[in-house]
Structure formats: structure tokens, C-alpha cells
Image: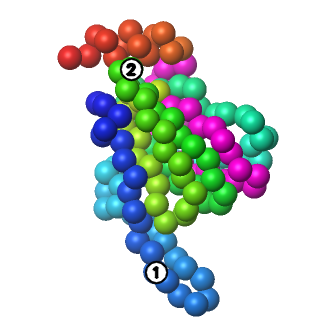
């Protein structure tokens, strides 16, 4: 997989004077079924999150409130995405080193995941990640 396989996906947006509505259906709007949802909030200014990769996990990241950046690295190329709207998100494929930074005050980051939490799926050492990406054809 390469960083080019990761992309911004627009979500349905139903506009209404009483407030807008967006929704996400696994396998329909994103390319996987949703097995886990978690969110980050109250991230102190100047902090970053992530700094890991997943061997098999697919994720979809949405800025529910505020904004933040997601930096993706496939071992050869790095790409930065700025997320600041709740009607689109970033699809992140497996074997992608990710870092989240530049959180605005009050931001909320929601992540939809293809699998339940599994510590064995994590790669937390960047050197190990690079070695694994070099061994892939």
C-alpha cells in the first residue's frame, strides 16, 4: 500500500435550516465494516498523537469539531492532510505510519476502525516499520 491509497472521502450531507446531518455507513461510504469507534479530545496544544502504524487495520478519521493534521508515511513518501469539517474524513489503509498534530482548541477526532483493539496489530517503532515496508514487494 502507498500513501496514494489513502484519501479524503466526502460524506453525505443533508442541509437543513435546523442543522445539518451527515452519516457514515460501513462498506457503503467507507471501504470496510465498522467494528470499533473511538475519539480523541482535550488534546493539549502542541501535543501530537499516533506515532504508530497498523499491520491490518483500516481507519477512517473525521474532525468532528475543530481541526488537526494527519501526517501519513508509507516508508517512501509522506503526505499531510488537514481535517477541519465533519462532512468528510480521511481513509487510512494498513501499513501506514500516522501522526496527528496541530490540534486546535476544543477539537474532537473520531476514528472508525475495521477491527477491535488488538495490540499485536500495532507497529510502534518507526525503524521496525521501515524494515517491514522494505520487505514488501
Question: Dot 2: what SS?
Answer: loop
**Residue 75, numbered label:** 2
Disc 2 crowd rating (10 Å Cα; few below 14, some 14-19, many 20+) is some
Residue 89 picture location, percent across and down: 46, 55
Query: Quadrant location of the C terminus?
Result: top left
Q: Nearer the viewer, residue 117 or 97?
A: 97
Residue drawn 48% across the image and 39% down it: 80
110 relative to 28 in the view: left or right: right
Residue at (46% x, 80% y) in the render: 14
Residue 26 location in percent, x, y? 37, 57
Foreground residue, 115 or 98?
98
Q: Is residue 82 magenta?
A: no
**Please, which colouring scheme is shown?**
rainbow
- Would you say 27 lies left or right of 49 here? left
**For residue 50, what is the image quadrant?**
top right
| Residue annotated with mark 1 | 14
For marks 1 and 2, the one nearer the N-term is 1
Please check the rendered image and state whether residue 112 is part of the magenta-colored stretch, yes or no: yes
Task: Note whether 83 is above or below 22 in the view shown.
Answer: above
Residue 81 at least partly seen: yes
Question: Could you tell me which residue is drawn at 28 percent across and 10 percent down?
Answer: 135
The location of residue 87, given as percent across then percent down, is 49, 66
Residue 100: x and y in percent read 59, 37
Bounds of the magenta segment: 98-124
Which image quarter is the N terminus in? top left
Q: Report helix, strand or loop for mark 1.
A: strand
The crowding category of the residue bearing disc 1, from other C-alpha atoms within 10 Å (few below 14, some 14 to 19, many at least 20), is few
Tell me the mark number nearer the camera, choosing from 1 and 2.
2
- Residue drawn at 77 percent across, 47 percent down: 42
Residue 79, located in which quarter of the rendered image? top left
Vertical arrangement, residue 105 with respect to residue 92, above or below = below
Q: Is residue 26 visible?
A: no
Amino acid at each position: 500500500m502507498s500513501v496514494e491509497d489513502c484519501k479524503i472521502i466526502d460524506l453525505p450531507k443533508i442541509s437543513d435550516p435546523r442543522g445539518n446531518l451527515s452519516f457514515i455507513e460501513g462498506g457503503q461510504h467507507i471501504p470496510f465494516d465498522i467494528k470499533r469507534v473511538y475519539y480523541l479530545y482535550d488534546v493539549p496544544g502542541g501535543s501530537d498523537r499516533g506515532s504508530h502504524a497498523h499491520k491490518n487495520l483500516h481507519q477512517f478519521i473525521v474532525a468532528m469539531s475543530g481541526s488537526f493534521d494527519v501526517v501519513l508515511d508509507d516508508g517512501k513518501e509522506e503526505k499531510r492532510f488537514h481535517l477541519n469539517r465533519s462532512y468528510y474524513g480521511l481513509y487510512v489503509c494498513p501499513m501506514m505510519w500516522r501522526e496527528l498534530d496541530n490540534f486546535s482548541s476544543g477539537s474532537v477526532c473520531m476514528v472508525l476502525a475495521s477491527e477491535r483493539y488488538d495490540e499485536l496489530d500495532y507497529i510502534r517503532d518507526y525503524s521496525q516499520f521501515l524494515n517491514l515496508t522494505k520487505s514488501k514487494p
